[in-house]
Amino acid sequence: MGNKKTKSRQSSNGSRPRSGAGARKNHVGADAFVRPVARSATGSPNQHLRTYSIPDYRLEHPDFTVRQVTKKDKYGHDHVRFEVEGEFDAPVPPIRDSKYLDKRQAIEIYRWMLLNRKMETALENLYKQGKVVGGVYFGLGQEACSCASAYALDRDDWFAPMIRNQGSMLVRGFGARDIMMQYMAKAGSPTRGRNATAHFGDIEKRNMVSPISMLGDLIPVMAGVALGARLQGRNLAVMTYIGDGGQSTGVTYEGINFASVQNLGLVLIVESNHWAYSTPSQMQYRCQDLAERAIGYGIPGVIVDGTDACQVYDAAHEAVERAHRSEGPTLIEAKMMRMKGHAIHDAAGYVPKAMFEFWRKRDPIARFENYVVREKKWLTPKENQDLIAGVEAEIEAEREIAVNSPMPTPESAEGGVFCENGCHKIKPKYGMPKVKKGTAYKATEAAVHLK
């Protein structure tokens, strides 16, 4: 519901504006990785005073206030719902030009985003046809964040998506058939039918760590991946994602803190969706922006528009380059809106319609299509239609393969549960860890410091 006033009892929770309106405007374009020196009243540097900058590269700062209200029905029963106020008619901002993407790269990201969207549409249809085992988790509205961030990684870098980051899996080499067969529990799926959601990975070729349902746990795991690579002589970037709800888990703090102390190349994308399942951001945390939490870890934090592929790519590219230079972690908060509920069974009726309408006008694919076709003229309308038709043909071919592939045989359930003899060799990926002479652990030492 929009600006309509009602006589209702308002909850004490959540009456503050969000998304940095007013408070963040002076940070736009600031240096993401420089802490300005604080000065005393006399103008001399004061090492006991600290100031930090959280750069905000968005071209708009939506200002919404979500309120929880309770109304009684004619029987005296309480009914809780949410109301939202804000400027819903604000014009859609343009795409910010990238500092790094060229024409070819921008078109490639656009194609990955289209592939991501078309694949999820096919999955939704398969679910409605009863061909999907279990639920389906969509990233509608998050395609720019998933695809552009993964595109910024080098071949040797590692990533760990969450269940909605299926676009990043496509960018890193999985086929649409792999993801569709996984949801249908087919024998040809990455887990050979032993799992029906996105819990699969590939540590041999694609450097992908499987999603973990316990939200936040991927962060210390990926910090460990970065540490293991460094012990083997490699400075790699390791990217993973977390939502605004999952970002409040304790293991998230522990993982970021460990990566910060050890100066590991963690690139954490915080997908700030405004809703953690049915809980609005204003009832989740007190800080204005989640990027502010980077200050407590002593690492750079930056805010981007998660529906602008150029902004996402540039922030991720710079974070990846920092990791390669062994300059430590980066926290990137991408603000956007998940345009469906938690899963396909969730109609998201708790979200006020005005909020959905606002973000629907900021569809990341429609915005990027306008950017590459009309603004930059990198694609003619005919070339764009041919590209879309090619993506649709690819998805249809992949869907046919997935649908017609066999289910696993009953007897196959006996194998592959445990690591059996000769299953695979566990060995360092890049070489034996490098250890300086004379640094062996002694029984009298109280601890081993890894840094």
Image (spheres, grey):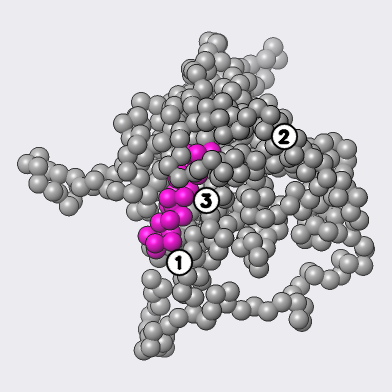
Residue 53 in view, yes or no = yes
Does residue 59 lie above or below 155 as drawn?
above
Nearest the viewer among 447 and 365 is: 365
Residue holding disc 1: 235
Q: Left or right: 298 with respect to 37?
A: right
Residue holding disc 2: 386
Range covered by the magenta-colored residues: 309-333
Does residue 267 lie above or below 107 as drawn?
below
Q: What residue is shown at x 79% (from left), y 40% (from top)?
A: 393
Nearest the viewer among 77 and 176 is: 176
Where residue 445 appears, as percent x and y from the top left, is 37, 84
Q: Left or right: 322 with respect to 41?
A: right
Quarter of the image that includes the C terminus:
bottom left
Lower sequence index among marks 3 and 2:
3
Q: What residue is shown at x 45% (from left), y 81% (from top)?
A: 434
Asked which quadrant contains residue 441, the reply is: bottom left
**Real-space Cα separation, disc 2 to disc 1, in angstroms:** 40 Å
Amino acid at the residue labelled 3? Ala
Q: Circles 3 and 2: CB distance less than 8 Å?
A: no
Lower sequence index among marks 2 and 1:
1
Q: Regarding mark 1 in the picture, which secondary structure is present there?
A: loop
Amino acid at the residue labelled 2? Asp
Badge 1: residue crowd in 10 Å (few <14, some 14–19, many ≥20) = many
**Real-space Cα separation, disc 3 to disc 1, in angstroms:** 16 Å
Amino acid at the residue labelled 1? Asn
Lower sequence index among marks 3 and 1:
3
Residue holding disc 3: 152
Q: What residue is shown at x 43% (from left), y 83% (from top)?
A: 435
Q: Left or right: 198 with respect to 91?
A: right
Q: Nearer the viewer, mark 3 or mark 2?
A: 2
